[in-house]
Image (tube, helix red, strand yellow):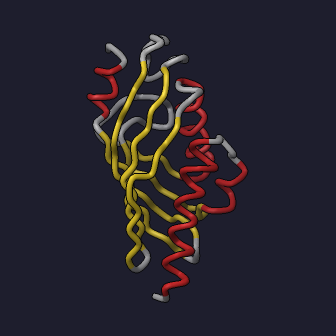
C-alpha cells in the first residue's frame, strides 16, 4: 500500500462526509461507492431505529442519506480523526442537527442532536465497498425525547 493510495482513500472518505452527508450530493454516491456497497449501522435506510441494520447498495444508501437530511435538514458531520491503514479507513465523527422532519417514527420536535460515532470503511479499487458505522442510537432517540 503506497502513501498515495492511503491519501486517496482518506480523500474518498472526506468526500463521503462532506459531499454526500453534509451537502446531500447524491450523484457522488455513484462515484465513490462500489456497486455492492454494504453498510452495517444503527437506523435502517427505511428509518427504523435498531442496534444493527444493513444498508445494501447505492440506492439504499441514497435513501438513508435522504432520510437523515429530511429529518435533520441542517445536519452537519465534523470529522474528528481519520486513520488509514491498508484498505481500511477509520473516521471518528460527530454529527449535529435540528429535528425538523419525521425520524424513526418520531414527529419533528425541533430539538438539537449531538452524536459521536466511528465509521470503519473498507476500500476496493479506490471506492468504499463496505462500512460499519457505530453510534449510540438510544442516545439519539433520547435527545429527540422519544
Q: Residue at x 58, y 31 (%)?
A: 69
**As rendered, which of 67 and 23 lies closer to the eye?**
23
**As rendered, which of 123 and 93 lies closer to the eye?**
93
Residue 14 x %, y %: 54, 58
Residue 140 x %, y %: 34, 28
Q: Residue at x 49, y 85 (%)?
A: 3
Residue 114 x %, y %: 37, 31
Q: Is residue 113 left or right of residue 31?
A: left
**Residue 58 against residue 74 in the figure, above or below:** below
**As rendered, which of 53 and 126 lies closer to the eye?**
126
**As rendered, which of 130 and 100 lies closer to the eye?**
100
Residue 126 x %, y %: 58, 74
Q: Name the residue furthest right.
A: 27
Numbered-mark total: 0
**Residue 53 against residue 97 in the figure, above or below:** below
Q: Is residue 26 left or right of residue 87?
A: right
**Residue 10 against residue 114 in the figure, above or below:** below
Q: Residue at x 44, y 52 (%)?
A: 79
Q: Name the residue furthest bottom.
A: 2
**Residue 57 against residue 99 in the figure, above or below:** below
Q: Residue at x 52, y 38 (%)?
A: 76
Q: The C terminus appears in which quarter of the rendering?
A: top left
Amino acid at each position: 500500500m503506497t502513501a498515495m493510495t492511503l491519501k486517496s482513500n482518506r480523500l474518498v472518505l472526506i468526500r463521503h462526509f462532506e459531499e454526500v452527508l453534509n451537502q446531500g450530493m447524491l450523484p457522488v454516491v455513484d462515484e465513490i461507492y462500489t456497486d455492492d456497497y454494504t453498510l452495517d449501522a444503527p437506523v435502517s435506510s427505511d428509518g427504523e431505529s435498531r442496534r444493527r441494520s444493513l444498508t445494501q447498495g447505492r440506492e439504499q444508501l441514497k435513501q438513508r442519506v435522504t432520510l437523515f437530511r429530511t429529518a435533520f435538514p441542517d445536519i452537519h458531520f465534523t470529522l474528528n480523526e481519520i486513520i488509514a491503514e491498508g484498505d481500511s479507513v477509520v473516521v471518528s465523527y460527530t454529527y449535529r442537527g435540528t429535528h425538523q422532519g419525521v425520524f424513526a417514527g418520531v414527529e419533528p420536535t425541533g430539538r438539537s442532536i449531538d452524536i459521536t460515532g466511528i465509521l470503519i470503511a473498507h476500500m476496493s479499487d479506490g471506492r468504499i465497498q463496505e462500512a460499519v458505522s457505530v453510534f449510540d442510537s438510544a442516545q439519539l432517540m433520547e435527545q429527540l425525547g422519544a
